[in-house]
Amino acid sequence: MRIEKGCNPNCSESVFRFMTVDPKQIQFILQAIADEVSNAYPDEKEIEIPLFKTAEEYDTKWNKEMLYSGKTREEYDTEIATIWKQRDLGKITQEEALKQYSEIQEKMSKIIYPNSLISACAGLGDHEAVVTIEKKKKAFRLNIGNNDISDNKTDWIGKVISLGIKVQEAEFSKELNELGRDCCCGISYFDDYENLIKDRETK
């Protein structure tokens, strides 16, 4: 699902670590979150998370760049500048310029986030959620825009809790906070969950 409208430009992201590498549990968690995102965009096609055989197949394979900075962006800078210049000269309309820019963003996203499964409103324009499989920790990390998941209208948090697995989140983990692509804004989700892992200084 591509989110091109209705996105709060001031929203940022949440970072979680779910202590499981069971493909069925990964799919369950991601689908619960995807349903929450889909609920925010009723006119868009619902996001469906496939059930893969291995945890590694869920990894986004993010190249650590962003849509607004890095080698990939630099390669498209001239083309992007040309679009805005043609618009300013009246050669194309604002609508045409936005369409062309959106197409370039789509191309960049496929390079930066080649295996993206969820797109959710996030700060600075990078809306692709990032799944990182952490084999040594026997966990997977999720970076995702927090604006579409904070309301918990589909009870995605309760669904995750029902699994009984341990969870970490940026508000209670300095490491995860620093792994955010943007400010995590102090939003928390699993405050009262008995299996929430917290840094000692935040307990």
Image (spheres, grey):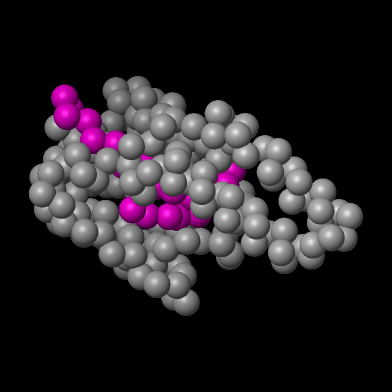
Chief SS of the magenta region: loop
Query: Which percent across, then down, holds residue 53?
Result: 10, 49
Q: Is residue 85 left or right of residue 123?
A: right
Q: Is residue 51 left or right of residue 88?
A: left
Query: Which percent across, then down, holds residue 69?
Result: 59, 32
Say whether residue 59 is magenta: no
Residue in the picture at 31% in, 57% down: 33
Q: Is residue 92 above or below residue 80?
A: below
Q: Is residue 81 above or below residue 48?
A: above
Quadrant of residue 92 in the image?
Answer: bottom right
Residue 117 visible to the viewer:
yes
Residue in the picture at 75% in, 43% down: 81
Q: Is residue 8 above or below residue 198?
A: below
Q: Residue furthest bottom?
A: 43
Residue 164 visible to the viewer:
no
Quadrant of residue 114 in the image?
Answer: top left
- Image quarter (top left, top right, bottom left or bottom right) of the N terminus: bottom left
- Image quarter (top left, top right, bottom left or bottom right) of the C terminus: top left
Q: Nearer the viewer, residue 32 or 4?
A: 4
Numbered range of the magenta stretch: 117-137
Say whether residue 126 is magenta: yes
Q: Is residue 66 left or right of residue 98?
A: left
